[in-house]
């Protein structure tokens, strides 16, 4: 009998939609949870890397003699060795960003490893450095730019004989000329880092030809093969394990060359090796987000409907170039006529990595600010401009959902009562307040996932899935889905994740995990229940199709007298456990369990001191849809966390790079500014789950709420001051400078 | 490896250099203050190389979570290094070498301190408590509230925060929200659990 996969209705659900505590909460809160960094096998060697001190240089010599003599140092591994080629000419590695690891010292203690690194003598020749990604003209002059693509969309078609580019130029100028309101704006957002609190790294050891790697990764099932390819061994001979990961945010999909080095050093020394990046290496190498800067001319009609958008934007993804994709410009809003052009800049900074909702936060921050400036120019409420322009959007969510979410957010913010025209609020001394908003979208499709499930004759339930918990509460989600399916409590389910030995499950990236594990665990659960139903039905002499599992019992839904306790039902399995494996393939059309495409609205209320330039968060509201919500408490935590990460990049954090040496000068947490507990103001979250959304199935949530904060907070500051502070983060210096430039 | 011999009265170890010189040699002014009254550490016996720097390895006794532990230390060894790598107490985390992240917060004589920037020799003779002492069979109210308020995501900052909150509430059991928001800014969370930490604290206060 084919099983029809489905979720119980809201009314039928006993577990889904409730908020049990996360299963590993106490382990995390008492230090019992063991992360990669906490793994201490016997005979462990502690390794530390030497980072390149210059943004662009040629390595002439790496002398490790003194390092090798440091007491406690066991092994020195050179990654970038200058040598003489077959033709007799010197081969000197060219390093293109600061921090790149050149050598690794392994020692008995951390201190000895650090001393060993300090004793390495490095000889290098500095080369030209370019890091100023905001300076487009400078980048062009330095030959650091490349085309990032673009698109022209016009209502009127060019004639047969027209040159397309000339026609577009003329047509856009005509539309801007006809526009009732024109905004010419400049907006930007600086590069930031992932700054995982647990740095990238691994603990590697060998047993014969088999590698065991504890790896801080958001890709347990995919990294065994990456190790295998790099080390030229079979994937089956690699075991990757990650029970807990101290932050990833899109930066931990691969072992990286430093985990490969750890494996090689372990092989060479015959001892387990722990190689974690230091804090500054984590900020320099562990991942960063591309910057974005945009110049735009925007035209609107008398009602504030945007009729034409003409933008050029640029930025850098670091040492391999890259720029925010033009496809997300202008963000969500898509007037009938637009032209957008992107330029990528290559700098001497480490290459960018996927940062939570790649491209979206930057696109939102550099384009929905222009829509707010239209409201400022017209002297009308930004809410009305956003609402009106929902008529022209390109989004994974529908305009009417945004409108409904805007109304809820406005009520929670008390927007209408608090709003004032830009720069026209009442000042309290030097402090002025303001409101701003933004909207966002994301896919959140469920990733591939396999789940192996065992139901034992004693009634115990175990599941095995090669997924991982980034902090989402993945274990708890898996347990809730199975508990709901079998009508048992969540603590009677044993969830096993975080090992590449388990059935494959996709990487946790792009809000794909909760959908993935909900799919695989629900499918496995329903498949297993169907098999159990057959033996229970035979015993009870009822139709197997009538069997349901709820409230700890398995029995006929038609005759409540005919039922067994969960334990009794499982005892019918005999001596062998019932074992099923269920599989979900990403992109499977029409799955009743998961879906893709969400929206959300955020509104910020800030206070700005015009004298000091300090921006304080007063209140921040998020309204978010995500289809069916498994655990509202965990969902709310995700959104709160995203809002705080948004406050971080809107007001505090940025990578600052020295233009002469390419050095990342604030790569320690004392200098890389992040918000603290006292910096967040009042945060309000509304989970938007009407039946029309719930019935769509599970959709991922990790990325979407981190998208809007930059634009919403920038718009609130602009509403307070009546002046746009163009570039995020809105530090006191930038606020004061923007005010000075205006007066 | 040399063994640290306790002789508080002489203040002079067999090798003939004084405690005062050792402390000056270690370059840690704070250590001097901390060690002056610690009778367990009378002197560190080490290799004097004529540059005033002691490089010897010594055995010391630490009082951690109510139990005494013999551990190895050099003058440069941090308390965090010993806790994590010798005692396998990995709750305190190595997030920053200085106290700016708060992830390595432990209690030393009931006061919050950064184990990453405390030399282990400074901790001799003091009562050290780590986050692990708040767990186990008798779960402390603070980690319990962190769980029920979901004040944790990846969890890497959580142990440091739990200890900081425990210390803060010991000092200010009736702290207002305003005091909480101004008094717990020594710890960084990258996942953004601050709002739920504030909730967790209100659960502990209410209970």
Image (cartoon, rainbow, N blue to C red):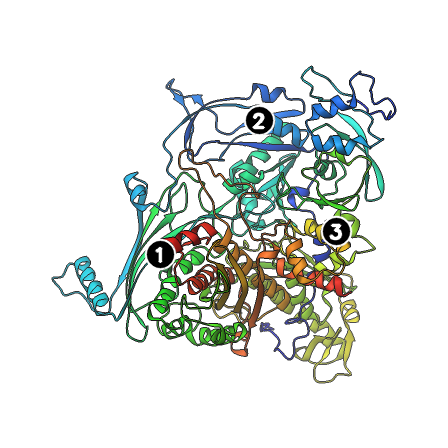
> Foreground: A597 or A650?
A650
In this view, A389 is above or below B69: below
Q: Residue at x 36, y 59 (%)?
A: A327
Chain of the residue displaying label 1:
A
Residue lying farthest front? A429
Q: Which label belongs to residue A489?
A: none
> Foreground: B39 or A119?
B39
Other-residue count near label 1 (Cα within 10 Å), few / some / many at <14 / 14–19 / ≥20: few
- Residue B100, given in percent of the width and then of the height, sits at 61, 44
On the picture, is B175 further left or further right than A672? right
In this view, A347 is above or below A528: above
The mark closer to the camera, 2 or 3, is 3
Mark 2, residue position: A118
> Foreground: B53 or B35?
B35
Q: Residue at x 14, y 65 (%)?
A: A159
Position of the C terminus of chain A by quadrant: bottom left
Q: Residue at x 62, y 58 (%)?
A: B194
> Foreground: B108 or A108?
B108
């Amino acid at each position: 009998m084919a099983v029809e996969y489905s979720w119980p209705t809201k009314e039928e659900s006993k577990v889904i939609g409730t908020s049990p505590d996360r299963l590993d909460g106490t382990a995390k809160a008492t230090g019992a949870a063991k992360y990669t960094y906490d793994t201490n096998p016997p005979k462990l060697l502690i390794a530390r890397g030497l980072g390149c001190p210059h943004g662009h240089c040629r390595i002439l010599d790496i002398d490790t003699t003194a390092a090798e003599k440091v007491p406690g140092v066991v092994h020195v591994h050179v990654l970038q060795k200058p040598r003489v080629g077959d033709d007799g000419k010197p081969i000197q590695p060219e390093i293109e960003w600061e921090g790149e690891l050149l050598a690794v010292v392994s020692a008995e203690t951390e201190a000895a490893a650090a001393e060993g690194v300090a004793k390495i003598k490095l000889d290098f020749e500095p080369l030209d450095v370019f890091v100023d990604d905001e300076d487009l003209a400078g980048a062009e002059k330095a030959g650091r730019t490349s085309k990032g693509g673009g698109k022209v969309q016009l209502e009127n078609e060019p004639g047969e004989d027209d040159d397309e580019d000339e026609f577009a130029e003329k047509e856009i100028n005509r539309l801007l000329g006809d526009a009732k309101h024109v905004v010419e704006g400049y907006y930007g957002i600086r590069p930031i880092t992932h700054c995982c609190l647990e740095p990238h790294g691994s603990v590697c050891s060998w047993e014969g030809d088999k590698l065991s790697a504890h790896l801080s990764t958001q890709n347990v099932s995919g990294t065994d093969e990456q190790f295998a390819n790099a080390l030229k061994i079979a994937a089956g001979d690699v075991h990757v394990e990650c029970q807990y990961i101290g932050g990833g945010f899109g930066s931990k999909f691969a072992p990286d060359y430093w985990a490969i080095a750890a494996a090689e050093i372990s092989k060479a020394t015959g001892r387990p090796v722990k190689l974690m990046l230091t804090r500054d290496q984590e900020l320099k190498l562990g991942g960063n987000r591309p910057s974005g800067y945009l110049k735009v001319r925007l035209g609107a009609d008398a009602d504030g409907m945007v009729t034409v958008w003409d933008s050029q934007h640029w930025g850098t993804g670091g040492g391999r170039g890259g720029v925010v994709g033009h496809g997300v410009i202008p963000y969500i809003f898509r007037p009938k006529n637009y032209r957008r052009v992107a330029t990528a800049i290559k700098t001497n900074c480490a290459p960018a990595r996927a940062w939570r909702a790649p491209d979206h936060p930057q696109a939102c921050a550099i384009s929905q600010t222009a829509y707010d400036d239209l409201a400022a120019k017209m002297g009308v409420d930004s809410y009305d401009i956003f609402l009106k322009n929902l008529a022209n959007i390109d989004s994974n969510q529908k305009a009417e959902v945004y409108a409904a979410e805007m109304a809820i957010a406005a009520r929670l913010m008390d927007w209408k009562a608090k709003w004032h025209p830009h720069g026209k609020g009442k000042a309290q001394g030097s402090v002025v307040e303001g409101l701003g908003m933004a909207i966002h979208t994301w896919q959140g499709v469920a990733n591939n996932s396999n789940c192996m499930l065992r139901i034992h004759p004693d009634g115990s339930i175990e599941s095995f899935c090669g997924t991982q918990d980034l902090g989402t509460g993945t274990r708890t989600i898996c347990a809730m889905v199975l508990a709901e399916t079998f009508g048992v409590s969540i603590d009677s389910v044993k969830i096993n994740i975080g090992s590449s030995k388990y059935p494959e499950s996709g990487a946790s990236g792009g809000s794909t995990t909760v959908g993935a594990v909900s799919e695989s665990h629900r499918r496995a659960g329903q498949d297993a229940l169907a098999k159990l139903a057959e033996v229970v039905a035979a015993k009870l002499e009822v139709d197997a199709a009538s069997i349901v599992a709820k409230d700890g019992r398995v029995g006929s839904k038609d005759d409540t007298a005919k039922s067994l306790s969960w334990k009794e039902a499982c005892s019918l399995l005999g001596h062998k456990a019932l074992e099923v494996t269920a599989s979900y393939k990403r992109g499977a059309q029409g799955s009743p369990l998961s879906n893709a495409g969400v929206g959300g609205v955020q509104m910020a209320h800030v206070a700005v001191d015009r004298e000091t330039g300090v921006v304080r968060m007063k209140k921040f509201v998020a309204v978010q849809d995500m289809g069916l919500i498994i655990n509202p408490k965990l969902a709310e935590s995700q959104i709160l966390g995203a809002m705080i990460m948004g406050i971080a990049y809107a007001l505090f954090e940025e990578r600052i790079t020295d233009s002469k040496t390419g050095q990342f000068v604030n790569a320690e947490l004392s200098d890389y500014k992040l918000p603290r507990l006292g910096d967040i103001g009042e945060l309000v979250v509304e989970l938007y789950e009407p039946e029309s959304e719930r019935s769509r199935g599970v959709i991922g949530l990790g990325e979407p709420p981190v998208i809007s904060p930059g634009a919403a907070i920038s718009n609130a500051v602009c509403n307070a001051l009546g002046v746009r502070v163009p570039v995020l983060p809105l530090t006191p210096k930038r606020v004061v400078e923007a005010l000075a430039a205006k007066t | 490896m040399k063994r640290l011999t306790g002789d508080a009265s002489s203040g002079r170890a067999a090798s003939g250099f004084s405690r005062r010189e050792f402390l000056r040699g270690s370059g840690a002014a704070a250590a001097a203050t901390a060690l002056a009254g610690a009778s367990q550490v009378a002197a560190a016996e080490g290799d004097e190389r004529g540059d005033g720097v002691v490089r010897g390895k010594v055995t010391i006794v630490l009082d951690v979570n109510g139990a005494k532990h013999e551990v190895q230390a050099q003058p440069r060894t941090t308390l965090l290094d010993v806790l994590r790598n010798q005692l396998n107490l990995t709750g305190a985390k190595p997030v920053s070498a200085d106290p700016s992240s708060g992830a390595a917060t432990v209690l030393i004589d009931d006061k919050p301190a950064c184990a990453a920037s405390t030399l282990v020799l400074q901790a001799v003779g003091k009562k050290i408590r780590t986050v692990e002492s708040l767990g186990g069979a008798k779960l402390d109210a603070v980690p319990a509230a962190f769980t029920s308020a979901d004040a944790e995501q990846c969890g890497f900052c959580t142990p440091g925060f739990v200890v900081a909150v425990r210390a803060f509430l010991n000092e200010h059991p009736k702290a207002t929200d305003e005091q909480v928001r101004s008094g717990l800014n020594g710890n960084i969370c990258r996942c953004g659990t601050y709002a739920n930490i504030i909730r967790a604290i209100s659960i502990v206060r209410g209970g």
